[in-house]
Image (tube, coloured by chain):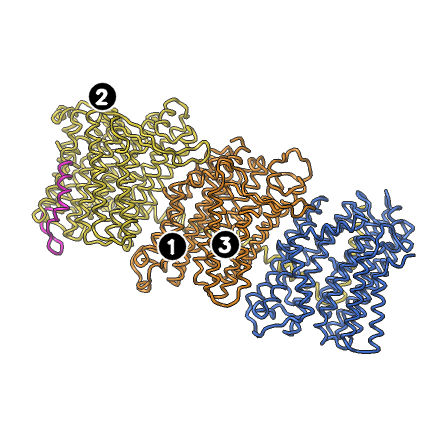
Amino acid sequence: MNDIAEIVFWMIPGLPLAAFVIVFIGLRVLRVNDWLGALLSIIATTASFALSVWLGIRLLIQPQTRLIEGFSWFSAGTGMNVDVGLLVNPLTVIMLVVVSTISLMVQIYSVGYMRRDGGINRYFSFISLFTFAMLSLVMSNNLLIMFMSWEMVGLCSYLLIGFWFHRPEAAKAAKKAFFITRIGDFGFLAALLILFNATGTFDIEGIHQAAAAGIVSATAITWAALGIFFGAVGKSAQFPLHTWLPDAMEGPTPVSALIHAATMVAAGVFLVARMYPLFEQSESALTVVAVVGGITALLAATIALVMWDIKKVLAYSTISQLGYMMLGIGLGGVWVGIFHLFTHAFFKALLFMGAGSVSHSTHTFDMREMGGLGRKMPITCITFVAGALSLSGLWPLAGFFSKEEILGSALESQPILFGIVLATVFLTAFYMFRVVFLTFGGKYKGKGKPHESPLVMLAPMLIMAVLAISAGWLNADGTIGSLLGEESNHSWTTGIFGVFTHSLTWVSLLLAAAGIMLAWAMYSKNWFSPKKVSSRFTSVNSLLLHKYWFDELYENIIGSRLLNNGLFRFFEIADERIIDGAVNGLASLTSYTGSMARRVQNGKLQNYLLIFITGVAIIALVAIIIN
Amino acid sequence: MGILSITIFLPAAGALLLSVLPGKNARIPRAVALAVTFLTLVLSCVLFASYDRSLGGFQFVDALSWIPAINSSYHVGLDGLSLSLVTLTSLLAVIAVLASRHITSQPKAFFAWLLLLQSCIIGVFSSLDLLLFFIFWELEVVPLYFLISTWGSNRKERSAIKYVLYTLFGSAFMLAGIVALYFTTGTFSLPELYNTDFAMLANGIPLAAMFFLLLAGFAVKLPIFPFHTWLPDTYSDAPTAGSIMLAGALSKMGGYGIARICLGLFPDTAASFSSLFMGLAVVNIIYGGAIALRQKEIKRIIAYSSFSHMGFVLLGIFSLNEIGLTGAALQMVSHGLIIGLLFAGAAILVKRTGTSRIDEMGGLARQMPVLCGLVFVAAIGAMGVPSSSGFVAEVSVYLGAFSASAEAAKIITIISLVGILLAASYMLNMVMKVFFGPVRESFASLPDIGSVEKLYLGVLATGIFTVGLYPQLITTVLKPAIKGLAVLWGG
Amino acid sequence: MNWMYILPEIIIAASALAIIIADLISRKPVIITTIAIVGIAASLIAACTSTVTFEPVFDGMLFIDGWSRLLKVLLLVVAGSVVIASTDYHARLKHSWAEFHALVLFSLLGMMLMPSAGNLISAFIAIEITSISFFVMVGMLKTPLSSEASLKMMLTGGIAAAVMLYGMAFIFGSTGSTSLAEIALSSQPDFSSGLLLGALLLLAGLLFEAGAVPFHMWLPDAYEGAPTPVTMYLSAGSKLAGIAVIARVFSMGLNNPGGLGADWGMAVAVISALTMTLGNVLALQQSNIKRLLAYSGIVHTGYMLIAVATIGLGGQVSGDEKLFFYMASFALAEIAVFTAVIVITRQIGSDRIEDLAGLARRSPLLFAIMSIGIFSLMGLPLTAGFMAKLFIFTSAVDNGLLWLMIIAVLNTVISAYYYLRIIRVMWLGKPSDGSALSLPKAPGLISIFSALGILLLGIAPYLLLKLAENIIFIP
């Protein structure tokens, strides 16, 4: 890559940023408010995309890491310098490709989806900013700049989730997303402090070298790693901070596609991958990553079983898949997690676009008001099913390959987690095909006449479908694995057909097929009614419908009772009554003393004389005592 | 008389001019005030630009023997720390004048007091003589008393007197400290005091006593918990210009005083009490933030948020190292811009909607997208979101505090991180309640802000981003001053 | 004998007699006033130009040194201001105009002699001349309030005189002399308990005149009941003379650093703390401007006593330039405020604070004068009052009285509350009657001059401080 001019690297995040500035400020000042903003955004992202893909191709030819020095941005004193620079290694390039592809597709799709909305400039400028933030997060060589981009990603998702701010739910969901991910940022920031304090630098390579050289104490490394992971837990919606992601569905659907596939939630996984050398030094931190990932995967999959909102199902599915990725990193290393992130990005974006396409014609997300759309929206249906199959992990679709790696890693090290992953495979296939059958099978139950979406929406979906099917083949000969530093590939992944030599493949395929069959039986053929099933397990059903009561726990019990109406209320009252009260009390005491003293000053002469004489007596007494 | 002295007294001269101006027209005093504050801003910018960064130290010095009997002189000068605050004050003064366009009752008096206030604040930042410092410090209560009690709202008279008594209470101790210091060293001159080795001077008054006496005044002004209860009342009842100057510029006098005097003169005492003050800083941050979250009135939310954010200043200062001190100084400038924008924006909201309760507002982003955007900029600044000035300031404070040598520094810093959660919580809550949600019938016809409002709110918003994206603008000026201070603790 | 030493006093005595004679010839008030002013002016010139000596004169009865000269000048200025300000009060004192002026001069004579006292006897006589004149002046309005005030003052004053005499007797018994110089000699290095008791009893008697707690009870009644010019005179004149005589008697006669000086110094310090605190607390509740100023005056007595205490603790002989600066700035503030109060109360017919409402609109000039005076009493920077307090505080800390200084500064905070209340009423209050108030020429002139003086001393205190120092310490 040495022959590539540095400017090319800077252009990748720079172009979307320029698009943001021009569209958000420039067009506003010029009062241009039509599709010019969208066009500029798309052009910028296309350029970034092209450059990223070019980098990706070069990477396949010759893997290499490149450090690009930038400029000194900020220095608070002698010891603290923040130098902006780029770190471009295979991990970076893979992420660049994912981010720019999804962003580009989403933007094109949005042209169709958002055409009836106002505020198009605002929308596209925010998407550009979002893309910029994610790209710079991926490319930064500096932990502080990464943190900044990380926060910018959070801010952009806030702005986009709350795009329809006049809807109270959207405003609330945006706030929730920002706030809950910020709880995670608490950990990231703490880790930043620990690492800077221990190493005196923000440079990622520098930190890794210092950690490897044993300059940083083992405790510090563990805490820092846990802090970073806690940050990722927030952003990547891991248990127990996963509650914001389903609510984030209040945003426009293309935004959901973007958030769920390539930006917001991927940031957390990427962060852990980027800081993996640190995690490597701490066995316990890696275990925590894997366990949290496993819990998340199963937990979210179970909730997805009962949701009626198509986007909510997809949202829980995302959480579950993110759990997979964390588990993969925790057990198998960077490449396992990132490979799944890579494939997941395509099929999840596709699924969201499909969901958007469906709602675009039915004006609802409630699957009980859909049905029979397969015939009315054939392309949407076909692409959606492709995505669903890929997500369920059916051979030879992309999801299959990446999931196998996770399963394999779990099998090797953690039997319990392996069980969880297997269960999740079954659940995933079931809930995805529940969606497919409810939406596209049977008869149409909603209002109006559904119709196929315009080409500008279908085209990205078709492209994504192709990727959702084929992306896994990239690793057929272990390319991605070796790029991301895996020396010994798992045997069952060599070649597209080589997988069948291992029994694990058969187990997982059988489980996925069983899930699909069950969904078919319940929701297409109605051999046994879902209602009956749910009435038989009322308590489980209600637990799932209430998402294990997490929201209630957080919002009502912790947020409201414990803090806002508990501790904070106590603070407020204490402030008014005790602290300010003490001040006011002092004031009233003074004036009370005044009125008491005034009683003596009552105009009666004998009083005056009495006091006078008393004063003299006291003075005389003092004089006698002194001597 | 040098350019600095002109900068200090120009607003006062403007006030004098206003007080002898005939006529009752509201426009002329406003124009005069605007011209004077603008000219002062230009002068401040000249000072800022012409400060020799490589030389450091106090520049633009004017010295004049004043009361030889007690060895006091008129001695002013600026280093990076004071220079950035002087510039901030001048900027906020212009904003305050612009934000006071609706003042129609006794406009002459209003603007005269405002200008006088500006002179006092600049004087505080520029004084190199402790007596002079105290005089400017104490004098500031008079204009504010009149501003709040006359042009304020709600229980304005009570708030005004509360403010004055609190301030005088603090400054009473401060005066005692200054006199004790004078008795110990025989001088009021700061540069001389910096070169005095206090440990060599044996006299009855312990250094810690002087340290705390001096600190009392600053503690009230900053404010440090538990000396803050004047703040919510005063900030929310003061007229807009008053709130802007109070929260934006005056509170910085507290932080500035601690750094310049308490730390500069008593480094060892400061070091031995640094844990205590870092602890108090965390109380400020969390306690203030928690109460802000409970508030229903927009100005009170902002007031408590200001209280909370001053905790960062305190935390940075008492980390006693270069990074933390730089962070504290950045936070002072940044907070000045943010709080100015918030108060100015809140004032417009309250005036237009006729209510100050956030749950009675709502959906205003539809009618006032520009105002919403600008206030949102302040909100992200207050939350410390990157690219805003709040981020660089708070992150530096955190980094400095975490590396501080105080005993519990690490734990304290980690606890203080909760502050970013609280800030996000109350700020987003405010933004959501005020701007988002369905449009209310009664506000349906409200117009967006006019071009003057756009101008001054926009300037502040630009400032927030400028400092956030290009902090070197300020840090290069700060560097020599902060370095000189940090050397006291060997760093 | 060199009569020139007491030329200023002689002129005043002569003017007083001239007034009585003139009253027999013509009852025109202009003539009376003119004689008084001319007499005071002549005396002022004499006081300024007279020679001073550090040796006691008239067989040790009087000191004519820098301290007494400074005080004479100050008291003459105050008396002159009272005379000028009272021209606005003519309507109420019509029938006793000459009597009033004669008494002003007689009491002035006593007051001028007070700081010059070189002997306990001469001090006592000077004090009594002053006191008796004031008893009469306070009751001059002949209203029940006024008469009652006079009676109370006279009775408590009688007791004070008795206590003072008793103390003098103890001192005489211990040292065998009433001359301050001789007392000073025989009280060193040891002193008997009788001498200490005597000194403290004498102090009690003298503190009555200055109005210190707990000998202050007469003061609010007298201030409220007396004609306002008399109140002004009591506050800016006799109070200062009382403090000055304490400084004189104790610094010359009983000063013995480390021994007696430390004892009475500490006693004064304690009394000072009590005085300012109690005065402040009581002032919080007042609704009458004259009564409020009475309590404010008590508070200022407390501040001045700090300086007196430092004289004792520091073993300083013959007065203190910082104390003088305080007295001068206090006098200026009282002149400004009281002159304005005289003018205002005559026109609004009330001396309640509420009735000052809207003064800022009715007369911006009077408001400005009142504000400057009040800010000076409050001790805000750029007024003489701030510098005065600052100087006193520095000498307090110099003499190990940090605790007293902290009490003092905290008291300034309490006092801000009631001072600001007056300002608030004048600035914000809605006037019941919106008509403009006028400021007559003569009182206007002195109030404006004193207000300007306050600002001048606030900005350039060195002018007066250096002068006082030179006069006191350089022969």
Asked which secondary structure carries label 1, the reply is helix
What x and y, as percent, mark residue C130?
A: 81, 64
Element class at badge 3:
helix
Which one is in front, A436 or A156? Answer: A156
Image colour assigned to chain C:
blue
Question: For residue A522: magenta?
Answer: no
Height in image: A575 above or below C400? Answer: below
Q: Can you tell which chain is drawn orange? A: B
First in sequence: mark 2 vs mark 3: 2
Rendered colour, chain A: yellow
Q: Residues within 10 Å of mark 2 (few under 14, many from 20)?
A: few
Residue at 28%, 55% (x, y): give it.
Answer: A166
Q: Residues within 10 Å of mark 3 (few under 14, many from 20)?
A: some
User: Residue A175, relative to residue A93: is it above or below?
Assistant: below
Residue at numbered disc 3: A576
* Residue identified by numbered label 2: A488
Residue B263 appears in view: yes
